[in-house]
Image (cartoon, rainbow, N blue to C red):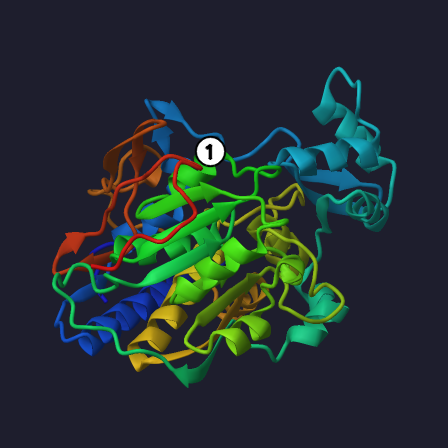
Amino acid sequence: MTGSRIPAWTGPLDVEGLGMDAAADAADAVRALAGSRGAIVRVEAVSTLVEASFAASEQLQVDGRAAEPWAPLSGFAPAADGWVRLHGNYPHHAAALRAALDLDGAADERAALAEACAALPAETVCARVQERGGIAAVVRAEVEWTRHAQALATRDDPWLAVEPGAPRPTLPPVRDVRRPLDGVRVLDLTRVVAGPMGTQLLGCLGADVLRLDPPHLPEQLDAFLAAGMGKRSAVIDLRGRSRSLESLVAGADVVVLGYRPGSLDRHGLQPEMLRARHPHLVVATLSAWGEHGPWGAREGFDSIVQAATGIAAVYSGDDARPGALPVQALDHATGLRLAAGILDLLASGRGGRVKANLVGAARDLLARPRGASAATDDSCAEEGGAPAQRLMIPTPHGRVQTVPPPLLLDGAALDAPIGGYGAAEPRWLPRE
């Protein structure tokens, strides 16, 4: 692990350690995978790249336009007996907030949202939002979370679990040491940050990553572009497409599932059934809360997990308003560790199962020794503490300024083209 400066993240929790350890895990896995294919490559996790990549959404620009990571209805709101955290970045989640809190027709939706939340207990606000299919969490103190039923159900679950399965065909020697995943096919059914960042790393390492999105719930363009390097993107309605989907699965080496646990089962994508039908597969799943317990099938986002587990309370200000991590570290660190688990199985020559969850990242972060951290050398920093690590990539959506994954291969940063959202055919490229 190398890096001459500490990431410019201040606060009571060891976000730096969480990020650097996850990047180091990914570096070790890349090294092992390359070695299994006859290549010797120097792989380094670098602090400046960790800092840059963990702030990818905030640093994204498209033709000079800065990204807007948060929608107006997302954020904290005071309830009658505490605080809630709401998530309205996606149109269907914003619509659920409007319906649950009776915001339709309000001249100032944010003010109306604050007024509606202030009149209700926090648990009631969240229950109403969730009943409408929205995303919300009560802001809890750490000790409150440790007593919660979901925390108790998952307290012994690892952040990352890797279960080796059947032997799979041996990967041939690589022709380019900077593309140790050349010839590996990855079917990517993930959204938002953690899953897409993990699969972006695989794409930048040379895998043929085919991302599928549904037509009725399109991904936000900025989110796609922030984690879109090295991927082909197809829009496909899985309903009625069982034969074509099964063909994609059969031709894949890796399937990554990042939707709410159980939500894709009706399309034949249950992880254990995938492994039974195709023992060669590496099947990776990502969840917010773990895959069992009362919240096991519930959606969640980094910010929501921070609120529920006590992280937001740890970052509260003098006015007792909840705070947040300086970056979406739970997402990014989990994405890196998910990628590392996939690489480890490929390196071992086996299929199997990889499971990762955001609540495990929160538990790891809260368990680390505490003390304010800060940048010790600003010579590489630009305004806002962002390091000078940027890529300029022409895309069908404009010229994109983005940042590379947090690893160096033989001293060079990783990069790859970004294709058009939904522009690819849902089929595999020929193996060369």
To which quarter of the image does residue 260 belong? Answer: bottom right
For the point 25% across and 46% down, the residue is: 416
In the orientation shown, which residue stands out farthest toward the top? 107
Instruction: State left or right for residue 30 relative to residue 373.
Output: left
Q: Mark 1 points at which residue?
A: 221
For the point 67% across and 40% down, the residue is: 76
| Image position, residue 397 (x, y; %) | 36, 27
| Image position, residue 72 (x, y; %) | 62, 28
Secondary element at image label 1: helix
To which quarter of the image does residue 308 belong? Answer: bottom right
To which quarter of the image does residue 103 belong? Answer: top right
| Image position, residue 411 (x, y; %) | 12, 57
Is any part of residue 369 visible from this angle?
A: no
For the point 30% across and 67% down, the residue is: 24
Please name whichever residue, 169 or 378, is drawn nearer the observer in this view of the structure: 169
- Quadrant where the N terminus is found in the figure: bottom left
| Up-down relation of residue 323 to residue 12 (above or below) | above
Q: Which amino acid does label 1 sit on?
A: Leu
- Quadrant where the C terminus is found in the figure: bottom left
Is any part of residue 65 visible from this angle?
A: yes
- Total marks in image: 1
For the residue carrying disc 1, how many other residues have a C-alpha within 10 Å: few (<14), some (14-19), or many (20+)?
A: few
Instruction: State left or right for residue 8 relative to residue 40.
Output: right
Please name whichever residue, 290 or 319, is drawn nearer the observer in this view of the structure: 290
In the orientation shown, which residue stands out farthest toward the front? 243
Instruction: State left or right for residue 390 relative to residue 221.
Output: left
